Image (cartoon, rainbow, N blue to C red):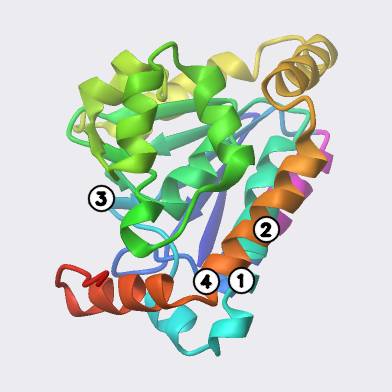
Amino acid sequence: MIKIEDHGRVRLLLLDSPPANTLTFALLEALGREAAAADRDESVRAILVASALPKYFSPGLDLDEILSLPPAERGQMFSKIASAHRALAACSKPTAAAMGGAALLGGFVLALGCDWRWLAESGKVSLSEIRLGLTPGPALLGLACAMTGKPGLIKELVLQGKTLKAHEALDAGLVDALLPEEGFLEAALREAQKLAKLPPKAYASVKRSLRKVALPQEEEAWREAQAEFAGLFEGPEAAEGLLAMKEKRRPKWD
């Protein structure tokens, strides 16, 4: 589920849930737990989240697990992914997401919890919850808007569900660098080793300040996001959107 490797002072957390790293309750809880453990470990100076699978970082939440829950309980999935995102964001040490393939929906939500996002040149990202009858919520929208000076592109991303190719995501500021597909993980580890050499206390202080600038009312934003997500999850649009995605067809909103 999560493979743990130490490369010098870099803790590598590898998502390893074939065939595509869909995000289950168990995987999200394990990721949050291991991120917190790495942050407490004094031998670790940087944390890298990556995938053991070549094609996907993660395509998002596990549809089978969501659809197995009664509609009134499906909002739990948001609290789980929000907790994993916030566990990564709360790390005082440098964190990076190495996305060697597609990082879609909840997969990109996890990546947004990291300080740095590195994407394979063939990769793609999305926050297309609207195509499922859902919303990314104000906290994630606030973060995304703080990262880019292109509000029009953010609207395409979240209001039309556009998937961004690697160069578009880089140009928008949603990822920090593109790395070659061949030798991707090795290149990401080299970048993470550079982060591990930065002064830890100063880094942690600046990181906290940046987060406050991006989300000045963070607790309120997450509470609002949870309420919005849970409300939509219980409704007919989300039920149709999720079922259509599972059946690989266009949703019928009428």
Whether residue 208 sits left or right of residue 166 in the image: it is right
Residue bearing the label numbered 3: 54
Which residue shows up at 72% across the image and 41% down it? 221
Residue type for callout 2: Gln
Asked if the residue at tag 4 contacts the one at tag 1, i.e. Cβ–Cβ closer than 8 Å, the answer is yes
The foreground one among 140 and 184 is 140
Q: In this view, does 89 lie to the left or right of 118?
A: right
Q: Is residue 37 highlighted in magenta?
A: yes
The residue identified by callout 4 is: 233
Q: How far apart are marks 1 and 2 (CA)?
A: 7 Å
Label 2 element class:
helix
Residue 83 visible to the viewer: yes
Q: Which one is in front, 188 or 139?
A: 139
Three-letter amino acid code at the position of disc 1: Gly
Q: Position of residue 35 (x, y in %)?
A: 69, 47
Kind of residue sitting beneath label 3: Pro
Of callouts 3 and 1, the N-terminal one:
3
Nearest to N terminus: mark 1 or mark 2: 1
Tag 1 residue = 75
Q: Residue at x 57, y 47 (%)?
A: 137
Which residue corresponds to the image point at 36% horizontal and 31% vertical from the top-left? 155
The magenta segment is 32-42
Neighbourhood count class around disc 4 (C-alpha, 10 Å): few under 14, some 14–19, many 20 upward: many
Q: How far apart in space, not on screen, are marks 3 and 1 (Cα)?
A: 30 Å
Q: What is the distance, in whole Å, between disc 4 and disc 3 at their CAs? A: 31 Å
- Residue at image mark 2: 226
Could you say where residue 31 lies in the image, as x and y percent from the top left?
62, 56
Q: Examine the residues drawn in magenta and state their main secondary structure.
A: helix
- x then y, percent, for residue 116: 52, 24
Say what secondary structure mark 3 lies in: loop
Disc number lying in front (4 or 3):
4
Helix, strand or loop at mark 4: helix
